[in-house]
Image (spheres, coloured by chain):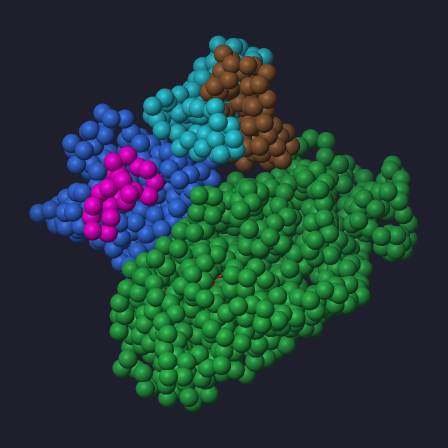
Chain colours: A blue, B cyan, C brown, D green
Amino acid sequence: MNVGVLVFPGSNCDHDCAHVLKDVLGQNVTMVWHKESSLAGLDAVILPGGFSYGDYLRTGAIARFSPVMQAVQQFAAEGKLVLGICNGFQILLEAGLLPGAMLRNKSLHFICRETYVKVENAATPFTNACKPGQVLKIPIAHADGNYYTDPVTLGGLQANAQVVFRYCTVDGKVVPGACPNGSLDNIAGIRSAQGNVLGMMPHPERCVETMLGNEDGRHIFQSMLSFLEQKKVAEVR
Amino acid sequence: MKAKIHVTLKSGILDPQGKAIEHALDSLGFKHVANVRVGKYMELDLQEADRAKAEVAVKSMCEKLLANTIIEDYRYELTA
Amino acid sequence: MKAKIHVTLKSGILDPQGKAIEHALDSLGFKHVANVRVGKYMELDLQEADRAKAEVAVKSMCEKLLANTIIEDYRYELTA
Amino acid sequence: MQADTSRITKDLIAQHNLTGEEYQKIVDILGREPNLTELGMFSVMWSEHCSYKSSRVHLKKLPTTGPRVVQGPGENAGAVDIGDGLCVVFKMESHNHPSFIEPYQGAATGVGGILRDIFTMGARPIALLDSLRFGELHSPKTRHLMKGVVSGIAGYGNCMGVPTVGGEIVFNDIYALNPLVNVFCLGLAHKDKIFRGTAAGVGNPVIYFGSTTGRDGIHGATMASDSFDDQSEQKRPTVQVGDPFTEKLLLEACLELMERDLLVGIQDMGAAGLTSSSCEMASRAGNGMELDLTVVPRREPGMTPYEIMLSESQERMLMVAKAGKEEDCIAICRKWDLDVAVVGKVTADGILRVKDQGKVVAEIPAKSLADDGPRYERPYQPPAYQDMLTNLNYDVLPDVKDANVALLALLESPTIASKRWVYEQYDHMVRTNTTVRPGSDAAVVRIKGTNKAVAMTVDCNSRYCLLNPYEGARLAVAEAARNLVCSGASPIGLTDCLNFGNPERPDIMWQFVLAIEGMKDACEHFKIPIVSGNVSFYNETNGLSIYPTPMLGMVGLIEEAERTMTQWFKQEGDDIILLGSAREDLGGSEYLKVMHAREQGSPPYLSFDTEQALHDCLLSLIRDGLLQSAHDCSDGGLTVTLAESCISGPGQPLGAVVQLSRGRLRKDAMLFGESQSRVVISSQSTHRQTILDQVRRFGVPAEMIGSVTGTRLTVHLREGASTESVIDQPVTALYDQWACSLERAVHHT
Ligand SMILES: Nc1ncnc2c1ncn2[C@@H]1O[C@H](COP(=O)(O)OP(=O)(O)O)[C@@H](O)[C@H]1O
Ligand SMILES: [Mg+2]
């Protein structure tokens, strides 16, 4: 897979994503500076976590105007894979590539800890390596991950199986107590109507290696790989 | 021309910061306080003498950048 | 009674947020914008009919909690 | 020379914290009276904070060399070789005074400052640790300070993408009006690509970059060299506001500049801003420097040369580029949206010459400013009350009645309770290197591209230092090393942050001198070089000094990252073995403070040889893969250590059944005394004999004391033929007490 990792001023999980894809999973990684305007040759792009533009004004609000974001719109419209993690998710929301907005965490604190998320839809390019309902342990690290959208949009998300991850207990119960940040409906990750854009608050790139004590994040990247693999096979036919 | 812009959370959207402040005020002994809401206040100078043009500009800044209209309302005043 | 409170950075104090917004507005094509400063705006309800008392309370809230007077100024209005 | 407009009066000199003799020395150096700008520049450079005038003669005693040392004290940070062509660059800094005035910004800019110290050396920062001291949490002021400081550290460090992987916090009312905020940072660099703050090469351009200069922080360095009184809150205009976003850009820009062959030297503008960075760089190279203030990027109109030279605006740097490379440097700074300007050049005459609008506004030999500050051998003498502190008659203290009650009280004490409420606000995982997260004896980060990992800890028991500054400092070194060793790391280097009261008081100076002696002896014994450090004096408010707090940040190397050890029990059925032995060490313990409200007695006994044998033994056991866990006994003694081993792991708490033989010790000394050189290990029982044999070879006392089992912590005490159950608690109860009490105290619920 040829994957681009976008670099905005203030991105800070860009190296982590590149490390996982390149050093651990052996893929071709291109770092894409936010002022670039082309994503030619890439199969997927990742908008990494961090504090683009210092999170000033609102998370993701300024980064969405970076030149590269026009290319991302185009890229997404062509059905290619776009994964936004944490700040990347926030940017996708601000850019309108995904519906909704982020509010401050209910506790008003930054929270860095392990969370459990339930795979609500295992038939996506990002979750096909998971079993439906599988519980993944993936850490979060954010201050603004309290997902909000209006009831109509929420109904649409639910109806179209666009909610991909929900915060849950270790044994998979989706209850308010398992939600670390106050997110509506325990939402931890959603995809676009077309299905090729995923935004998630937890950081799968932080749990891909045994050395770090947890490999659940591997499922996400593995899913993307096998999706692209199958697509390639299909195209050849 | 100077623009003064208020960006506030839409009514109906839970404002955790407002809640926290309300709580803190309460424990400081301010018992008669309710409905605390927190928003942003921005000031900027605009090199534009024409009021109508300035208005168009500020409105467009708010829509595009300064407010997220999914969760926020905005209002502005222009002063010379 | 309703209080509307503005908390702004003292002049001379660095406002990194304002700077970032100014920069962003500029690159969005709003070239004539300068001196963007960002502050907080708060609204709250006060169960207090006496204006003078309300005023004392709000001032004290600002001093104690709502503003960080080391780096911020505040002002408020009371409306019925 | 510009005509001098303002006369230098006695008042002005005093306002600048300079003595009459110091002023005379300035006049002698210049051969004339200084003007106001020059007076300001001398005042900041000769402040205690920048010149180390009270501490220098003593700091010289510390051991700073060793086979791994790449850079010792004197630069922005120290550097130690870890093999594979790499070195770790680290240092610790205090931001105590600013954090008291404005906790969020004070702590945030403290993080910003230490990060710059690391990346100016050409190292990418990969870990932060914070060491904090507050008053007790029953005071609203303390809760406000603590919340502000913690979110300030989080706000800055998280945004920078540098994980805060550990730290320590102690609560004691002695710090109520003088909290301590010490931040440690470690970076990784190529050994042959270390950058230094030198202005070599006459004619080379001097380039300013980063943020603009404003009026903030003027006289921060002198403030940090002044005691607090009730008027301190008036000193507020000196508060600086941090901008971590700009610092992140500055970091990336610096590393990009350094990757190319563009720079001669580089230094951050920390305390004393443009003045210190310019004169120190010039002085190190034996050169001079000419600066033109007219082109310095600034935030506010109408700034005077005095203000520009003394401003402590954050996120700024000064670099000396190779001649002809200025355009390349400027292009990189612009790419990262930073302000940048060529503000001067390196000169041969050794003079720091500052011009504004074409006029010379200051002209001072760079070396005089940077290095020829006053040096004092301040008198020192133990305080009259010292004996009262150490003499404690234990006979008046009844032995513990219900040890369960004492254990629960200790676990609830915020000093011992879990610090989760704090470290969950810190991103401790970013950069995906953190193999041991906060919550074990030391934090561990792996070094990508190698098999290695680096362990880090910050430690200081300041109560021990109060009771006996010499012993306290030795104990701090031993504890830090022990925490590293428990994680499987060999100590390779040390940085310090020496927080003390007013050095002009002989009793404080006595504490300082003895603490240095203690550190020196311990470091020499354990062969751990001190490669960087910081002194913070005048930590007192209204005449009341803090406890002497020589905070240590120690770094260890784990050659094989898989051989990393953590403190919590892993598995039902494992053996529990205690290495080391107990003595009657109740003096200065957390137990005495919590249960008897006394901070008295002599600190625990420490033998270097016993401690060293323990380290050697433990490292060999860990490297042979024989252990499941290792946790040292510190605050709260053996029982707290056992409890923490049961409950501090990431999974479900595990129970343990333990038998101890009391010998001739008091029960409370046995259970809660803080005897040194002890570690609780757990291991699979198949390894029991191997372990006991190995331990014997190292001459370390060892006793098999129980096993990991069930859901309760049960401790039996054997005395002669009889056995008494002294502790019996469900581990969930211990966990709840320990895990939640800090948060409860902070929220006052
Ligand atoms: N201020 C802090 N920031 C981050 N981590 C902290 C802080 N204080 C304590 N911790 C973590 O909590 C754990 C226990 O700390 P402490 O009791 O000081 O350990 P020790 O006694 O072994 O030195 C350590 O892992 C430490 O890193
Ligand atoms: Mg320890």
Quarter holding residue B66: top left
Return the residue nearer the eye: D74 or D611. D611
Q: Nearer the viewer, residue D603 or D301?
A: D603
Q: Residue furthest left?
A: A237
- Examine the image and state in which quarter residue D62 appears: bottom right
Kindly identify the residue that appears in the image at 45 percent across and 66 percent down: D401
Q: Is residue D625 magenta?
A: no
In terms of depth relative to the viewer, which is nearer, D144 or D309? D144
**Which part of the image, by quadrant, shows the N terminus of chain D?**
top right
Quadrant position of the C terminus of chain D in the picture:
top left
Q: Which contiguous range is marked in magenta? A: A167-190
Identified at 45% across, 30% down, the residue is B22
Q: Is residue D726 above or below residue D433?
A: below
B28 vs A98, left or right, is right
Q: Is residue D183 left or right of residue A100?
A: right
- Quadrant of residue D703 within the rendered picture: bottom left
Residue A158 appears at what percent x and percent y?
18, 33
Where residue D494 appears, x then y in whole percent?
Answer: 57, 68
Q: Is residue A130 visible?
A: yes
- Check the image and report above or below for B73 versus D610: above
Tell me, yes or no, if residue D343 can be seen here: no
Q: Position of residue D271 (x, y in %)?
A: 67, 50
Q: Is residue A180 magenta?
A: yes
Total numbered badges shown on the rendered structure: 0
Q: Residue at 45% of width from left, 17% of height from top?
A: B75
